Image (tube, rainbow, N blue to C red):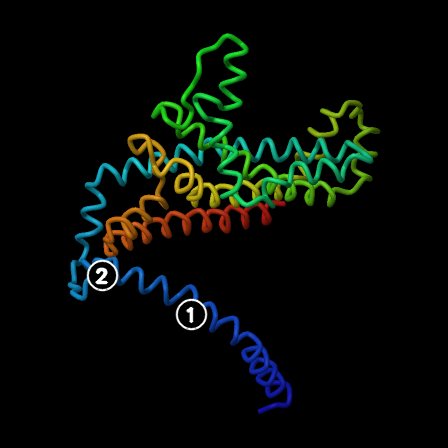
Amino acid sequence: MTPLSAQKRAEARVGLMLAAPAILLLVLLVVLPVLATAGFSLTDYRLGTQAIGFAGFDNYAALWNDPRFWQSVANTATYTLIVVPGSVGLGLGAALLIESRGWLKPFYRVAYFLPVASTFIAMAIVWEFLMNPSVGLFNQILAALGLPSVNFLGNPQTALYSMAAIGIWELTGFNMVLFMAGLSAIPRDLYDASAVDGAESGWDRFRMVTWPMLGPTTFFVVIITMIRAVRVFEVAAVITQGRPEGATEVLLYSIYVQAFQYFNIGYAAALIVVFLAVTALIALAQARFGGQREANR
Protein backbone atom coordinates (compact mmCIF):
# COMPACT_ATOMS: atom_id res chain seq x y z
CA MET A 1 0.00 0.00 0.00
CA THR A 2 1.48 3.33 -1.06
CA PRO A 3 1.53 6.29 1.37
CA LEU A 4 -0.87 8.18 -0.90
CA SER A 5 -3.50 5.42 -0.87
CA ALA A 6 -3.14 5.03 2.90
CA GLN A 7 -3.73 8.76 3.32
CA LYS A 8 -6.85 8.58 1.16
CA ARG A 9 -8.19 5.66 3.19
CA ALA A 10 -7.57 7.57 6.41
CA GLU A 11 -9.35 10.64 5.03
CA ALA A 12 -12.27 8.45 3.94
CA ARG A 13 -12.55 6.97 7.45
CA VAL A 14 -12.52 10.44 9.01
CA GLY A 15 -15.15 11.65 6.56
CA LEU A 16 -17.35 8.62 7.29
CA MET A 17 -17.03 9.22 11.04
CA LEU A 18 -18.04 12.86 10.62
CA ALA A 19 -20.99 11.95 8.41
CA ALA A 20 -22.14 9.03 10.59
CA PRO A 21 -24.36 11.10 12.96
CA ALA A 22 -26.18 12.72 10.03
CA ILE A 23 -26.58 9.36 8.28
CA LEU A 24 -27.93 7.81 11.48
CA LEU A 25 -30.47 10.60 11.90
CA LEU A 26 -31.49 10.27 8.25
CA VAL A 27 -32.08 6.54 8.68
CA LEU A 28 -33.98 6.94 11.97
CA LEU A 29 -36.12 9.95 10.99
CA VAL A 30 -36.68 9.38 7.26
CA VAL A 31 -35.79 5.94 5.93
CA LEU A 32 -37.28 3.78 8.70
CA PRO A 33 -40.57 5.76 8.93
CA VAL A 34 -41.01 5.56 5.16
CA LEU A 35 -40.39 1.81 5.19
CA ALA A 36 -42.79 1.39 8.13
CA THR A 37 -45.46 3.41 6.31
CA ALA A 38 -45.03 1.32 3.17
CA GLY A 39 -45.37 -1.80 5.31
CA PHE A 40 -48.56 -0.58 7.02
CA SER A 41 -50.05 0.26 3.62
CA LEU A 42 -50.06 -3.48 2.87
CA THR A 43 -52.06 -4.33 6.00
CA ASP A 44 -55.61 -3.91 7.29
CA TYR A 45 -54.46 -2.42 10.61
CA ARG A 46 -56.87 -0.15 12.46
CA LEU A 47 -55.74 2.07 15.33
CA GLY A 48 -56.71 0.67 18.73
CA THR A 49 -56.90 -2.97 17.66
CA GLN A 50 -54.31 -5.67 18.23
CA ALA A 51 -55.18 -7.68 15.15
CA ILE A 52 -53.22 -6.94 12.01
CA GLY A 53 -53.42 -8.88 8.78
CA PHE A 54 -51.71 -8.77 5.43
CA ALA A 55 -53.96 -7.12 2.85
CA GLY A 56 -51.59 -6.95 -0.10
CA PHE A 57 -52.55 -4.16 -2.46
CA ASP A 58 -56.18 -4.04 -1.35
CA ASN A 59 -55.74 -0.56 0.14
CA TYR A 60 -54.37 0.73 -3.15
CA ALA A 61 -57.25 -0.88 -5.05
CA ALA A 62 -59.74 0.72 -2.65
CA LEU A 63 -57.95 4.03 -3.05
CA TRP A 64 -58.17 3.79 -6.84
CA ASN A 65 -61.93 3.28 -6.64
CA ASP A 66 -62.55 5.87 -3.91
CA PRO A 67 -64.23 9.04 -5.32
CA ARG A 68 -63.31 10.92 -2.15
CA PHE A 69 -59.62 10.27 -2.85
CA TRP A 70 -59.91 11.57 -6.40
CA GLN A 71 -61.77 14.63 -5.16
CA SER A 72 -58.94 15.37 -2.71
CA VAL A 73 -56.42 14.94 -5.53
CA ALA A 74 -58.40 17.31 -7.75
CA ASN A 75 -58.69 19.84 -4.92
CA THR A 76 -54.96 19.65 -4.24
CA ALA A 77 -54.14 20.08 -7.94
CA THR A 78 -56.51 23.05 -8.29
CA TYR A 79 -55.11 24.65 -5.15
CA THR A 80 -51.55 24.18 -6.44
CA LEU A 81 -52.33 25.58 -9.90
CA ILE A 82 -53.73 28.74 -8.29
CA VAL A 83 -51.25 29.24 -5.47
CA VAL A 84 -48.01 28.65 -7.38
CA PRO A 85 -48.37 31.35 -10.07
CA GLY A 86 -50.15 33.71 -7.67
CA SER A 87 -47.58 33.58 -4.87
CA VAL A 88 -44.58 33.47 -7.24
CA GLY A 89 -45.82 36.48 -9.22
CA LEU A 90 -46.70 38.52 -6.14
CA GLY A 91 -43.45 37.53 -4.45
CA LEU A 92 -41.44 38.73 -7.44
CA GLY A 93 -43.46 41.94 -7.62
CA ALA A 94 -42.96 42.61 -3.91
CA ALA A 95 -39.22 41.98 -4.20
CA LEU A 96 -38.92 44.40 -7.12
CA LEU A 97 -40.99 46.98 -5.25
CA ILE A 98 -38.84 46.76 -2.14
CA GLU A 99 -35.61 46.99 -4.13
CA SER A 100 -36.80 50.30 -5.58
CA ARG A 101 -38.00 51.89 -2.32
CA GLY A 102 -34.74 53.26 -0.91
CA TRP A 103 -34.95 54.14 2.79
CA LEU A 104 -38.35 52.42 3.16
CA LYS A 105 -36.85 49.00 2.40
CA PRO A 106 -36.79 47.79 6.06
CA PHE A 107 -40.46 48.67 6.55
CA TYR A 108 -41.61 46.87 3.40
CA ARG A 109 -39.45 43.85 4.20
CA VAL A 110 -41.14 43.45 7.57
CA ALA A 111 -44.62 44.13 6.17
CA TYR A 112 -44.37 41.53 3.40
CA PHE A 113 -42.50 38.95 5.49
CA LEU A 114 -44.99 39.15 8.38
CA PRO A 115 -47.20 36.30 7.05
CA VAL A 116 -44.19 33.97 7.14
CA ALA A 117 -43.31 34.87 10.73
CA SER A 118 -46.90 34.76 11.99
CA THR A 119 -48.45 31.68 13.57
CA PHE A 120 -51.02 30.43 11.11
CA ILE A 121 -53.34 29.19 13.85
CA ALA A 122 -53.65 32.78 15.08
CA MET A 123 -54.00 34.22 11.60
CA ALA A 124 -56.74 31.68 10.81
CA ILE A 125 -59.01 33.54 13.25
CA VAL A 126 -58.35 36.75 11.33
CA TRP A 127 -59.14 35.12 7.99
CA GLU A 128 -62.34 33.57 9.32
CA PHE A 129 -63.43 37.02 10.45
CA LEU A 130 -62.48 38.66 7.15
CA MET A 131 -64.50 36.08 5.19
CA ASN A 132 -67.46 35.85 7.57
CA PRO A 133 -70.67 36.00 5.50
CA SER A 134 -72.40 38.33 7.99
CA VAL A 135 -69.86 40.65 9.63
CA GLY A 136 -66.70 39.97 7.62
CA LEU A 137 -64.72 42.89 6.23
CA PHE A 138 -64.84 41.57 2.67
CA ASN A 139 -68.63 41.36 2.70
CA GLN A 140 -68.84 44.81 4.29
CA ILE A 141 -66.89 46.14 1.31
CA LEU A 142 -69.20 44.29 -1.09
CA ALA A 143 -72.24 45.75 0.69
CA ALA A 144 -70.77 49.26 0.44
CA LEU A 145 -70.40 48.72 -3.30
CA GLY A 146 -74.00 47.54 -3.57
CA LEU A 147 -73.04 43.94 -4.29
CA PRO A 148 -74.56 40.83 -2.68
CA SER A 149 -72.71 39.10 0.15
CA VAL A 150 -70.64 36.00 -0.56
CA ASN A 151 -70.22 33.01 1.74
CA PHE A 152 -66.56 32.60 0.83
CA LEU A 153 -65.83 29.53 2.96
CA GLY A 154 -69.32 28.03 3.11
CA ASN A 155 -70.14 27.85 -0.59
CA PRO A 156 -68.73 24.84 -2.51
CA GLN A 157 -68.25 27.09 -5.55
CA THR A 158 -65.98 29.58 -3.73
CA ALA A 159 -64.49 27.70 -0.76
CA LEU A 160 -61.47 26.22 -2.54
CA TYR A 161 -60.63 29.51 -4.27
CA SER A 162 -60.90 31.33 -0.94
CA MET A 163 -58.55 28.78 0.58
CA ALA A 164 -56.14 29.33 -2.32
CA ALA A 165 -56.22 33.09 -1.68
CA ILE A 166 -55.14 32.42 1.90
CA GLY A 167 -52.36 30.18 0.59
CA ILE A 168 -51.13 32.92 -1.75
CA TRP A 169 -51.04 35.36 1.16
CA GLU A 170 -49.12 32.83 3.25
CA LEU A 171 -46.43 32.05 0.65
CA THR A 172 -45.89 35.46 -0.95
CA GLY A 173 -43.57 36.72 1.80
CA PHE A 174 -41.39 33.61 1.69
CA ASN A 175 -41.05 33.84 -2.09
CA MET A 176 -40.29 37.54 -1.79
CA VAL A 177 -37.26 36.79 0.40
CA LEU A 178 -35.95 34.25 -2.11
CA PHE A 179 -36.36 36.68 -5.00
CA MET A 180 -34.65 39.44 -3.02
CA ALA A 181 -31.67 37.14 -2.55
CA GLY A 182 -31.63 36.54 -6.30
CA LEU A 183 -31.88 40.27 -7.05
CA SER A 184 -28.99 41.08 -4.71
CA ALA A 185 -26.77 38.65 -6.65
CA ILE A 186 -27.25 40.46 -9.98
CA PRO A 187 -24.15 42.59 -10.76
CA ARG A 188 -24.95 46.30 -11.01
CA ASP A 189 -22.63 46.54 -14.01
CA LEU A 190 -25.18 44.66 -16.10
CA TYR A 191 -27.72 47.45 -15.61
CA ASP A 192 -25.13 50.03 -16.67
CA ALA A 193 -24.34 47.96 -19.76
CA SER A 194 -28.04 47.62 -20.59
CA ALA A 195 -28.40 51.40 -20.41
CA VAL A 196 -25.67 51.70 -23.02
CA ASP A 197 -27.57 49.17 -25.16
CA GLY A 198 -30.71 51.30 -25.02
CA ALA A 199 -32.56 50.06 -21.91
CA GLU A 200 -34.16 53.31 -20.79
CA SER A 201 -37.26 52.28 -18.84
CA GLY A 202 -37.65 50.00 -15.86
CA TRP A 203 -39.43 47.47 -18.06
CA ASP A 204 -36.47 47.41 -20.45
CA ARG A 205 -34.06 46.76 -17.57
CA PHE A 206 -36.31 44.02 -16.21
CA ARG A 207 -36.69 42.37 -19.62
CA MET A 208 -33.03 42.57 -20.63
CA VAL A 209 -31.26 41.99 -17.30
CA THR A 210 -33.40 41.15 -14.28
CA TRP A 211 -35.61 38.41 -15.69
CA PRO A 212 -32.85 36.44 -17.49
CA MET A 213 -30.56 36.64 -14.45
CA LEU A 214 -33.39 35.52 -12.15
CA GLY A 215 -33.96 32.34 -14.17
CA PRO A 216 -32.33 29.89 -11.71
CA THR A 217 -33.93 31.64 -8.73
CA THR A 218 -37.36 31.58 -10.37
CA PHE A 219 -37.06 27.88 -11.17
CA PHE A 220 -36.10 27.12 -7.55
CA VAL A 221 -38.94 29.26 -6.18
CA VAL A 222 -41.51 27.57 -8.44
CA ILE A 223 -40.44 24.08 -7.36
CA ILE A 224 -40.33 24.95 -3.65
CA THR A 225 -43.71 26.67 -3.86
CA MET A 226 -45.19 23.70 -5.71
CA ILE A 227 -44.01 21.30 -3.00
CA ARG A 228 -45.37 23.55 -0.25
CA ALA A 229 -48.69 23.92 -2.07
CA VAL A 230 -49.07 20.16 -2.49
CA ARG A 231 -48.39 19.83 1.25
CA VAL A 232 -51.21 22.19 2.22
CA PHE A 233 -52.87 21.10 5.46
CA GLU A 234 -53.28 23.91 8.00
CA VAL A 235 -55.88 25.87 6.05
CA ALA A 236 -58.09 22.83 5.54
CA ALA A 237 -57.63 21.54 9.10
CA VAL A 238 -58.07 24.82 10.97
CA ILE A 239 -60.49 26.87 8.86
CA THR A 240 -62.63 24.60 6.68
CA GLN A 241 -62.19 21.01 7.97
CA GLY A 242 -62.70 19.91 4.38
CA ARG A 243 -66.15 21.50 4.20
CA PRO A 244 -68.44 22.24 2.50
CA GLU A 245 -69.26 18.90 0.90
CA GLY A 246 -65.58 17.98 0.65
CA ALA A 247 -64.87 21.01 -1.54
CA THR A 248 -61.71 21.89 0.44
CA GLU A 249 -60.56 18.40 1.43
CA VAL A 250 -56.99 18.20 0.17
CA LEU A 251 -54.76 15.14 0.14
CA LEU A 252 -52.98 15.69 3.47
CA TYR A 253 -56.23 16.45 5.25
CA SER A 254 -57.74 13.28 3.76
CA ILE A 255 -54.82 11.35 5.26
CA TYR A 256 -55.48 12.97 8.63
CA VAL A 257 -59.19 12.06 8.50
CA GLN A 258 -58.51 8.43 7.60
CA ALA A 259 -55.84 8.01 10.29
CA PHE A 260 -57.22 9.96 13.26
CA GLN A 261 -60.97 10.08 12.71
CA TYR A 262 -61.66 6.74 11.03
CA PHE A 263 -58.52 5.08 12.57
CA ASN A 264 -57.93 3.29 9.26
CA ILE A 265 -54.14 3.20 9.47
CA GLY A 266 -53.58 0.83 6.55
CA TYR A 267 -55.59 2.96 4.14
CA ALA A 268 -54.03 6.18 5.47
CA ALA A 269 -50.57 4.67 4.95
CA ALA A 270 -51.44 3.93 1.32
CA LEU A 271 -52.47 7.57 0.92
CA ILE A 272 -49.14 8.66 2.42
CA VAL A 273 -47.22 6.47 -0.03
CA VAL A 274 -49.08 8.11 -2.93
CA PHE A 275 -48.39 11.55 -1.47
CA LEU A 276 -44.68 10.77 -1.06
CA ALA A 277 -44.55 9.55 -4.65
CA VAL A 278 -46.03 12.83 -5.90
CA THR A 279 -43.58 14.97 -3.92
CA ALA A 280 -40.69 12.74 -5.01
CA LEU A 281 -41.65 13.23 -8.66
CA ILE A 282 -41.64 17.00 -8.16
CA ALA A 283 -38.21 16.83 -6.51
CA LEU A 284 -36.86 14.63 -9.32
CA ALA A 285 -38.21 17.09 -11.88
CA GLN A 286 -36.35 19.86 -10.08
CA ALA A 287 -33.11 17.87 -10.10
CA ARG A 288 -33.42 16.86 -13.75
CA PHE A 289 -34.50 20.14 -15.32
CA GLY A 290 -32.31 22.14 -12.96
CA GLY A 291 -29.31 20.09 -14.08
CA GLN A 292 -30.23 20.60 -17.74
CA ARG A 293 -30.48 24.36 -17.20
CA GLU A 294 -27.04 24.45 -15.62
CA ALA A 295 -25.58 22.34 -18.44
CA ASN A 296 -27.05 24.65 -21.09
CA ARG A 297 -25.79 27.85 -19.49
Numbered badge on residue 288: none
Q: Which residue is mark 1?
A: 28
Q: Which residue is mark 2?
A: 48
Q: Residue furthest top?
A: 146
Between 10 and 251, which is closer to the camera in this rendering? 251
Query: Residue sitting at 36 percent across and 23 percent down?
Result: 157
Q: Position of residue 191 (x, y in %)?
A: 79, 34
- Sequence-first tag of 1 and 2: 1
Between 81 and 258, which is closer to the camera in this rendering? 258
| Quadrant in which the C terminus is drawn | top right
Q: Residue 133 occupies which quadrant of the picture?
A: top left
Q: Residue 265 occupies which quadrant of the picture?
A: bottom left
Looking at the image, is 208 positioned above or below residue 114? above
Q: How many marks?
A: 2
| Quadrant in which the N terminus is drawn | bottom right
Tell us which disc is closer to us: 1 or 2: 2
Q: Position of residue 221 (x, y in %)?
A: 57, 42
Task: Tell whether 150 sits left or right of 21.
Answer: left
Looking at the picture, which amino acid does disc 1 mark? Leu
Q: Position of residue 33 (x, y in %)?
A: 36, 64
Between 206 and 268, which is closer to the camera in this rendering? 268
Query: Residue sitting at 72 percent across and 24 percent down?
Result: 203
Query: Residue sitting at 81 percent across and 34 percent down?
Result: 102
Looking at the picture, which amino acid does disc 2 mark? Gly
